[in-house]
Each structure stands twice: as structure tokens, then as C-alpha cells.
Amino acid sequence: MNIITTMADDFLWGLILILGVNLYQRKFSGTNAKRLATIYIAALYLLFNIVLVMIITYQLNPIIAIPAGAIIIAIGVLFREKVWPYKRHCVHCGKKLDQEHILGHDDNLCFTCHLEANPVEAEEYKKKEEEKRLMREEQEETKPFIVPDTVDEMDWDSWDPEEKCTLVYLIDKERVLLIHKKQGMGTGLVNGPGGHIEETETADEAAYREFKEETGLNVHTIHMIGELNFQFKDGISMRGYVYLGDGYDGELASSDETTPFWCNRSELPMDKMWEDDRLWLERALQGDHFKGYFIFDDQTMLSQKITFDEE
């Protein structure tokens, strides 16, 4: 009898749950059959609760609840198409349905199959999506990104550079290999060999490849020593991965973009290099790891923030 009493006492909570599902289903169009199903389920649940209340009120044998429940379940099975129209998988392609399509949408189709079965609705959906896309583009055009003048004003956490590149400084005793840049970004300046990372390669792969292309040499081993993050006032954004190289073979050779040359580590031509190089290059060549953030206007550095980790 205790079980019967507990079930009767919890009836209201069960009914609230069923009706809550019914209210949730109102969010979705084409859900009339499934909304009616929750009403049928609630009615059967109420009928079973009436049986429980009668057992408690008239002190009847609790065993009566078992056949009564079986009869109510049989009624549900008999009218299962109306009582339980819910499916867990798309009836057309078999794809697992999400909660919205399990409890809503009487056709029990996934979103894709539903659009295929309703070309008019699919066309309306495409028009709405196109309108949203045009609206987003319009908003992006009306709210251009304005590059701040200082690194502290930049939201570096959400910053996503449009370009990524590598720099490799090959060290041979007291010498380091540098390049004169003949064309492209930084034309006329001295830098380390390197270039853009292609979509199909890692930073390490790009470092080896670009070094070979710009110097004619094969560097034997490299290890990353630092990271450079550049935001230019004209909108260009770039992240550079800096490597130190050790060991090489081959013959030094110029390319269309660069002329490589050896330089004594104590005589780095800082006056001919990017402004930020004088802040980190010497320490990087000594093995200090670093990370830097910079704002540039063309080749003029406006603001910088750099940290070192000697370990």
C-alpha cells in the first residue's frame, strides 16, 4: 500500500512534467499530432491515478493496480499511433533525431529530409538564410575593424591572424645566417630566412621548406624559441614562429626574394632590421624563449609588449 500511496502523491509532478512537454512542443510548427499525444498520455496517466485513489479510499487490494495498469497500457498500445507518434530516428534516412525533432514535427524527419520533402519551405528557408548572410555582411561593412595604437587596447584573446609564417636563425659558432629582403613585405630590410605557412603543412615543415628556398641550405635541426604577433594599422595581421637552427649542408644561394649572408652575432645590423628585432633577437640567439605583441604602421612600430622566459 505504501507504493500505491507514493505513486498517488507524486501524480501531480508527473502531470506537470507531461504538460510541460506539451507547452515546449508549441515552439515548433507542424506538431499537432505530437501535442495531442501528450494529452492522451496525460489522460491515461490520470485514469491510472483514479484507480490508485480508489484503492486507497476504499482500502482495496493493492494487487488491483497491476491489472488496471495492464489494461491502461493495452489501451495505449491499441491506439499507439495516436498515443506514441514519437521516433528517435529519421523515418527517411535513419539519422538520429535531436530533441526538437523527437518531441516536435509530426513527420519525424530530420531537418535535411524535411526540406527535401517540402521544396516550398526549403526555398523560404534559403531566402531567410540569404537575408541573414547579407545582413551580417552589411553589419561587417558598417562596422570596420579599427586597429588601436597600443597593444593594451587590442583584444589578443579573440585576435585571429590572417597570416602565419616562420623565421629560422641558423647559428654556426659565432655566426648567424641572415637575408636581405629584395621583394615582398619588409623589402630592403634584413631578416631571418622564412616565409608563409601553407594550409597543408605544419609550422616546422614550413620552416624547413622556406629556409631551403631562401638560402639554398638544408638546416639539420630546428627548435622553436619564440612567437611574434603583429597587427598592422592597414589591417594586416600576422603571427610568426621563431626558430633557432643547428647544423646544415648545401651551398649558399640567392633567390628571387632574398640574398642570404653570414653575420657575426656581435655585429647584428639592427639599424637595417625591423624595429622589434632589437627587442628580442639578441636574447633569442642566447636561447631565451619569448612572446611578443606589436602594433605597426607600415614599418614603424607604434607599440609593443614582450615577455621572456630564460628557462
Image (cartoon, rainbow, N blue to C red):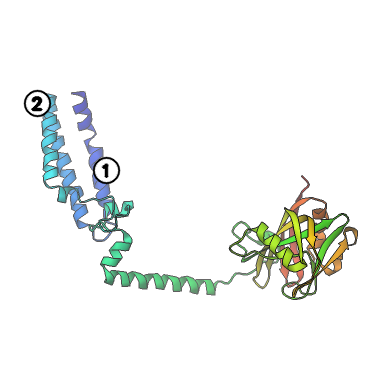
Q: Secondary structure at mark 1?
A: helix
Q: Is residue 217 shown to the viewer in this render?
A: yes
Q: Is residue 73 above or below residue 191?
A: above
Q: Residue 181 falls in which quadrant of the image?
A: bottom right
Q: Nearer the viewer, residue 96 or 252?
A: 252
Q: Are the two marked residues, 2 and 1, in contact with CB atoms closer than 8 angstroms?
A: no
- Residue at 82% across / 56% down in the picture? 171
The number of callouts visible is: 2
Q: Nearer the viewer, residue 45 or 179?
A: 179
- Residue at 75% across / 74% down in the picture? 257
Q: Nearer the viewer, residue 41 or 265?
A: 265
Instruction: Residue 249 in the image: state x and y as whole percent.
Output: 79, 59
Where is mark 1, residue-wise?
17
Using residue 16 as the reference point, say whether residue 296 is left or right of it. right
Q: Is residue 133 above or below residue 287?
A: below
- Alpha-carbon span between mark 2 and mark 1: 28 Å
- Residue at 9% across / 26% down in the picture? 58
- Please tell me how crowded label 1 is: few (under 14), some (14-19), or many (20+) other residues with Cα within 10 Å: few
Q: Nearer the viewer, residue 250 or 87?
A: 250
Determine which of the numbered discs, if any, sits on residue 75 in the image: none
User: Label 2 is placed on what type of residue?
Assistant: Tyr
- Please tell me how crowded label 2 is: few (under 14), some (14-19), or many (20+) other residues with Cα within 10 Å: few
Q: Is residue 84 above or below residue 252?
A: above
Q: Nearer the viewer, mark 2 or mark 1?
A: 1
Instruction: Residue 158 in the image: state x and y as whole percent.
Output: 59, 59
Using residue 60 as the reference point, say whether residue 142 is left or right of it. right
User: Label 1 is placed on what type of residue?
Assistant: Leu
Determine which of the numbered discs, if any, sits on residue 58 in the image: 2
Which residue occupies the extreme front position in the image? Answer: 250
Q: Quadrant of the N terminus?
A: top left
